[in-house]
Image: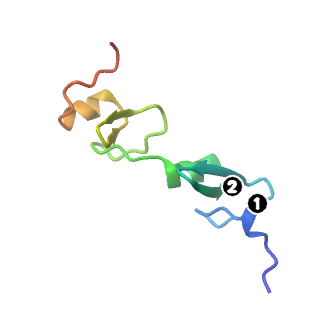
Amino acid sequence: MDTTDTATRCEVCGNDYDMAFEVRAQGAVHVFDSFECAIHKLAPVCEHCQCKVIGHGVQAGDRFFCCAHCARESGADQVRDRV
């Protein structure tokens, strides 16, 4: 019988960690053992270069990009890094 507390098990890597933490996002509760796993699971992916968007990023409509350059390369001409 498994007596492991599922509230401490990372949903990405499965590590059972006593210092796991919860992230609440869009009505769901997620449990992770590290920020790396949280980023892997929750961060949007840039539609141009496919990197994880872990900073502010850029949103054009319903599309996410890591930066204004990638947004412009994908046709979002009005996006700028600075105003």
Q: What residue is pinned by disc 2?
A: 33
Q: Name above or below for residue 6 compared with residue 76.
A: below
Point out which mark residue 65 bears.
Answer: none
For the C terminus, the image quarter is: top left
What residue lies at 41% left-to-right and 33% top-to-bottom? 57
For the N terminus, the image quarter is: bottom right
Q: Disc 2 residue type?
A: Asp
Q: Position of residue 22 (x, y in %)?
A: 68, 52
| 13 or 43, nearer to the observer | 43
Q: What residue is pinned by disc 1?
A: 17
What residue lies at 35% left-to-right and 43% top-to-bottom? 46
Which one is earlier in the sequence, the residue at label 1 or at label 2?
Answer: 1
Q: Disc 1 residue type?
A: Tyr
What's the distance in space between the residues labelled 1 and 2, CA to CA?
A: 6 Å
**Tag 1, which secondary structure?**
loop
What residue lies at 51% left-to-right and 51% top-to-bottom? 42
Q: Position of residue 78 (x, y in %)?
A: 22, 24
Q: For residue 75, what is the image quadrant?
A: top left
